[in-house]
Image (spheres, rainbow, N blue to C red):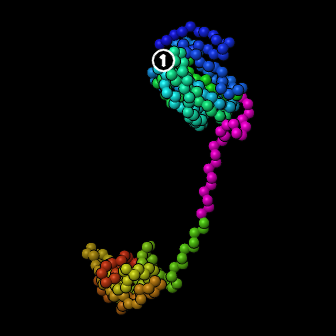
């Protein structure tokens, strides 16, 4: 690590810092050092990331951020610089830095980023894209050298990035949905299985053998019509599943009322009175789902 005695060159408007002439005159007229930990003692690279923060007691307008990368006299191609609010996490930048040479022509030891934004009073982390070569020493509390420059003038439109987070635009109001089509006209079924293509009703869903059973068609799918039959299914007390097949009569068009030919089959009494049977719609080749229930009564 290189150590040099402090040298004052105020007449030239510069200081000798760690053996490198570093211009302290801000690039923007009227700008001052709002925060700086530069000193004239020897420096070293950072062995691990160490946060460097600047605290402002009142709002400031920032127009320049400067950091130092001596890196053993090798410098470092400039990266980016910025600030991050400790209070809100808002990031200002990052801004591309320009490099300038130092002592002995060491390239890119001074990183300077031009900026133009305002921040409220508070504490701000310094964001340097290459902390391993960011110079520090004991006098800087082992934090990277930085100078934040600007002024305390009130911010005006055109010279800063607005602080307020833009309010996201409200999504456009969706057009009203078209009304749900009314169900097909006709008598209300006495039982509807959700999503079924037909429903049992409007005739009573219970009765003795021969009771008329209506099937109200809710969906007419050309790929599966005509509807030809219903299967009655139950599990009697004996535990053996029972199935009774019955023929449908009438049109399969949507809104039509088909009927079970001959009414409730007498075979439903095989499961005794008050047994509930489920009805399954079928066509000539397959079952198309449950459409309701029927309870047989009056069995001998």
Q: Is residue 244 above or below residue 193?
A: below
Magenta span covers which residues? 152-174
Answer whether residue 49 is magenta in the image. Answer: no
Whether residue 30 is visible to the viewer of this picture, yes or no, is yes
Label 1's element?
Answer: helix
**Image location (x, y in percent) of residue 203:** 45, 86
Q: Nearer the viewer, residue 13 or 228?
A: 13
x%, y% of residue 290? 38, 76
Q: Is residue 154 left or right of residue 219?
A: right
Q: Is residue 59 above or below residue 182?
A: above
Q: Does the magenta run of residues contain 168?
A: yes
Q: Position of residue 275 (x, y in %)?
A: 35, 79
Q: Which residue is mark 1?
A: 73
On screen, residue 117 above or below 52 = below
Q: Quadrant of residue 260?
A: bottom left
- Main SS category, magenta section: loop
**What's the residue at 34%, 82% (across, down)?**
283
């Amino acid at each position: 690590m290189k150590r040099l005695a402090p040298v004052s060159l105020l007449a030239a408007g510069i200081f000798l810092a760690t053996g490198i002439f570093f211009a302290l005159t801000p690039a923007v007229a009227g700008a001052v050092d709002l925060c700086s930990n530069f000193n004239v003692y020897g420096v070293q690279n950072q062995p691990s990331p160490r946060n460097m923060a600047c605290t402002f007691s009142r709002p400031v307008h920032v127009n320049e951020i400067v950091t130092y990368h001596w890196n053993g006299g090798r410098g470092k191609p400039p990266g980016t610089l910025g600030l991050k609010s400790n209070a809100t996490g808002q990031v200002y930048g990052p801004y591309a830095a320009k490099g300038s040479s130092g002592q002995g022509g060491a390239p890119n030891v001074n990183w300077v980023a031009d900026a133009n934004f305002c921040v409220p009073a508070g504490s701000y982390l310094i964001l340097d894209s290459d902390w391993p070569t960011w110079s520090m020493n004991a006098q800087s509390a082992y934090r990277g050298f930085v100078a934040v420059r600007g002024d305390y003038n009130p911010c005006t439109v055109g010279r800063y990035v607005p602080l307020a987070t833009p309010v996201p635009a409200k999504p456009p109001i969706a057009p009203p949905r078209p009304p749900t089509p009314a169900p097909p006209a006709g008598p209300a079924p006495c039982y509807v299985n959700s999503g079924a293509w037909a429903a049992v009703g409007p005739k009573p869903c219970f009765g003795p053998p021969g009771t008329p059973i209506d099937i109200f068609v809710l969906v007419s799918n050309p790929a599966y019509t005509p509807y030809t039959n219903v299967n009655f299914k139950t599990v009697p007390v004996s535990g053996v599943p029972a199935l009774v097949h019955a023929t449908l009569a009438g049109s399969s068009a949507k809104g039509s009322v088909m009927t079970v030919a001959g009414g409730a089959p007498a075979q439903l009494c095989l499961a005794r009175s008050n047994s509930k049977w489920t009805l399954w719609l079928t066509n000539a080749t397959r079952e198309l789902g449950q459409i309701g229930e029927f309870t047989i009564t009056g069995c001998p």
